[in-house]
Amino acid sequence: MNLVALVTYLLVMSITPGPNNLVLASASVNFGFSRTLPMLLGMALGLSLQLGALTLFLGAVMSLMASLQLYLAIAGCGYLLWLSWNLARAGKAGGGAAARPMGFFGGLMFNWLNPKVWLMGFNLVMVFLPTQMDPWRAAIVFALAAFFTSLPCVIVWAGSGVAIGRFLDSPLRLRAFNCSMAAMLAATAIWLLAEMMPAHSLGALMA
């Protein structure tokens, strides 16, 4: 296993804009870094657990996962579109006591509905998993590498949201920011789904 290439891949996938990072940046703008921290830790841990589980089980259920891949993408993208709609309608967090970010458990489970993480996991196993390596050992290596690589990346995104929040002290600018982030999140969902469709159509033609 090429650990340098593995960490580089995880770093690029974790630091680039995606549903996790967009939601984190928006949450830190609206709620602050400390209230976003549980969600941040949940996302980093959830990513590592998901990649470890995919590494462990993907080989045994490859045909089933391939047949379900499109439906998983549709469900995940539908959730992201719903999330973007709620993000666009969000107002100033301080306006109500009930307003709060997603939380640790929400962050932990968010990845399972994130199409980018599913694509990342499939590619990770296909490209970096040595055929002779024990699946349990590979799952532990992938999970640890994902956690320690993604954690500083999501901290950067949440921290950037705090810095941005200092310039969004007016309701109008905050609404513009939330709508922009919502549009980017929706575009990401549609783009990820569009990536899945040609591969699925090609697989149906070859079946």
Image: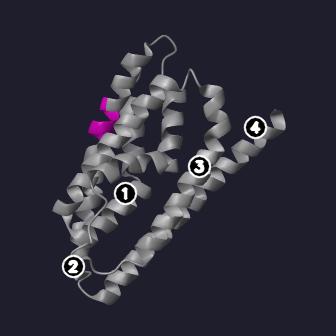
Instruction: Name above or below for residue 135 compared with residue 153.
Output: above
**Mark 2–mark 3 distance (CA, rounded to whole Å):** 34 Å
The rendered magenta stretch, by its main secondary structure, is classed as helix
Say whether disc 3 or disc 1 marks the residue closer to the N-terminus: 1
- Mark 1–mark 4 Cα distance, whole angstroms, equals 31 Å
Residue placed most toward the observer, 167 or 41 = 41
The boundaries of the magenta stretch are: 144-149
Q: As drawn, is 33 to the left or to the right of 179? A: left
Q: Nearer the viewer, mark 2 or mark 1?
A: 2
Q: Residue furthest top?
A: 132
Disc 3 residue type? Ala
Which residue has dot 3 on it?
73
Name the residue beneath numbered marker 1: 21
Q: Is residue 23 magenta?
A: no
Residues at marks 2 and 3 touching, judged by CB atoms closer than 8 Å = no
User: Label 2, on which residue?
Assistant: 94
